[in-house]
Image (cartoon, grey):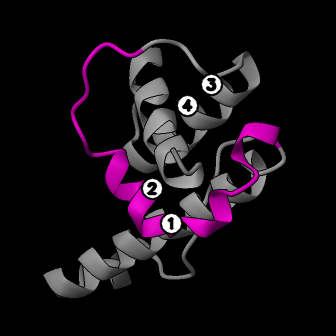
């Protein structure tokens, strides 16, 4: 599976002409598109069946949170999907522990405890 990619039709010269607010909106829109692609891929995993009940924006915000060392809850394939999503948004990989932290936060929202 390739990275989640969202392309814009604008060339770099045109993008350079946008104001800061527009560029921030475009970046947020790009990240939400990546998150939507991630959700479509991960919801095929039984543990994530309810992920459509969480907004893409909420999950995106989880990628910006700091975390503590987290017990492993993800399979290798799920880790791959998380890494793919995270790298597509932030242009770098995170730790396995961070991906597990994000997953545990998602599970808290999916499952009634």
Residue that badge 2 annotates: 59
Q: Secondary structure at mark 3?
A: helix
Q: Residues within 10 Å of mark 2 (few under 14, many from 20)?
A: some
- Which residue sits furthest front? 113
Q: Is residue 105 left or right of residue 72?
A: left
Residue 42, horizontal then vertical, whole percent: 73, 46
- Region in magenta: 45-70
Residue at the spot x=59%, y=20% of the render? 73
Residue 74, horizontal then vertical, whole percent: 63, 22
Residue that badge 4 annotates: 83
Inter-mark Cα distance, 4 to 1: 16 Å
Up the image or down, 70 lies above or below 8; here it is above
Residue 18, horizontal then vertical, whole percent: 24, 87
Q: Residues within 10 Å of mark 1 (few under 14, many from 20)?
A: many
Residues marked 2 and 1 touching at CB (< 8 Å)? yes
Q: Secondary structure at mark 4?
A: helix
Among numbered discs 3 and 1, the one appearing first in the sequence: 1
Dividing the picture into quadrants, the one containing residue 51 is: bottom right
């Amino acid at each position: 599976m390739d990275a989640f990619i969202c392309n814009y039709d604008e060339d770099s010269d045109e993008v350079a002409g946008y104001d800061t607010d527009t560029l921030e909106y475009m970046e947020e829109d790009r990240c939400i598109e990546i998150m939507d692609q991630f959700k479509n891929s991960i919801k095929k995993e039984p543990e994530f069946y309810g992920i459509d009940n969480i907004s893409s924006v909420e999950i995106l915000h989880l990628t910006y949170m700091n975390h503590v060392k987290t017990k492993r809850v993800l399979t290798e394939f799920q880790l791959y999907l998380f890494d793919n999503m995270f790298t597509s948004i932030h242009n770098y990989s995170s730790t396995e522990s961070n991906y597990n932290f994000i997953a545990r936060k998602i599970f808290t929202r999916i499952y009634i405890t």
